[in-house]
Image (cartoon, grey):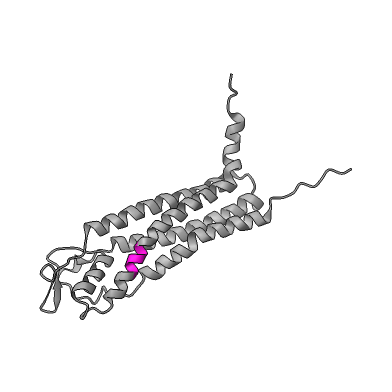
Amino acid sequence: MPPPKKQGRDKRTTLALVLACLVCGVPVAGTLLSLEITFFPIDTIPLKQPDAIINDSHIALLAAAFLALIASVCVALGTVSIRHLTPNNAFVGIMTLGFGAINFAGQLVILALVYISNAAHPESKSTIEVKFVNGQYDTGGRQFTHETFSCMMGNLYLAREPWSTNACSEYHYARYCTILLVNTGFLLLGISYWPVRKTLFAGQKRSAPAKV
């Protein structure tokens, strides 16, 4: 009898892994982007101190979304490649696992940066601290993130800044998305390890010295 044909790797498993990669990146990142690009008239707000609104957290949140999108797509492509196109290719395996690891580490750093920045630049609670004088907002040297400034405007000057209530709410939810991105980043790291585990780590087990 002729020897049985060697079966390739299950395409359904590959499809499941690819879908899992995309689910770990696209929905939360897309939601974060849609929230973070909410209307915020930073160029038309009359500020006495031009640097009163800082962009660090805003940029970090956008970076978190793009990082998650790029990592999920790259891990998905790497999974297809390592399972079907270039089996046992160590370079592809390292790149696939690397994207998963970089994404997870990056999401942790961004989460910490965003929450620390918000805590370091809280919103003012009184019109004595932030005054509207001569057609300008005088913050007295205080600085605010996009979120804390819009929430402060909603609490203190809603009649003048009607956009602030919606912006405050959406920036809140955008910040909470960083927690979800850390969790999905951890899942993506696990998914990126699964298809490359034999390629990268099987040799270490075979070459391990025998116990005496």
Q: Quadrant of the image for the N terminus?
A: top right
Where is residue 185 shown, x and y percent of the image?
46, 53
- Residue 203 lies within the magenta run: no
Q: In the displayed structure, does residue 175 sit left or right of residue 155?
A: right
- Type of secondary structure dominating the magenta stretch: helix
Q: Where, by quadrant of the figure, is residue 28 drawn?
A: bottom left
Which residue is found at the position 32% from the left and 64% from the top?
Answer: 58
Q: Which residues are magenta?
A: 170-175
Q: Is residue 89 above or below residue 176?
A: above
Q: Is residue 207 above or below residue 139?
A: above
Viewer-nearest residue: 108 or 124: 124
Residue that extends furthest to the right in the rendered view of this protein: 1
Q: Is residue 203 above or below residue 138?
A: above
Q: In the displayed structure, does residue 72 sit left or right of residue 195?
A: left
Q: Quadrant of the image for the C terminus?
A: top right
**Can residue 102 be seen by looking at this rendering?**
yes
Where is residue 160 shown, x and y percent of the image?
20, 80
Which residue is found at the position 19% from the left and 69% from the top?
Answer: 50
Viewer-nearest residue: 83 or 29: 29
Where is residue 136 shown, x and y percent of the image?
14, 76
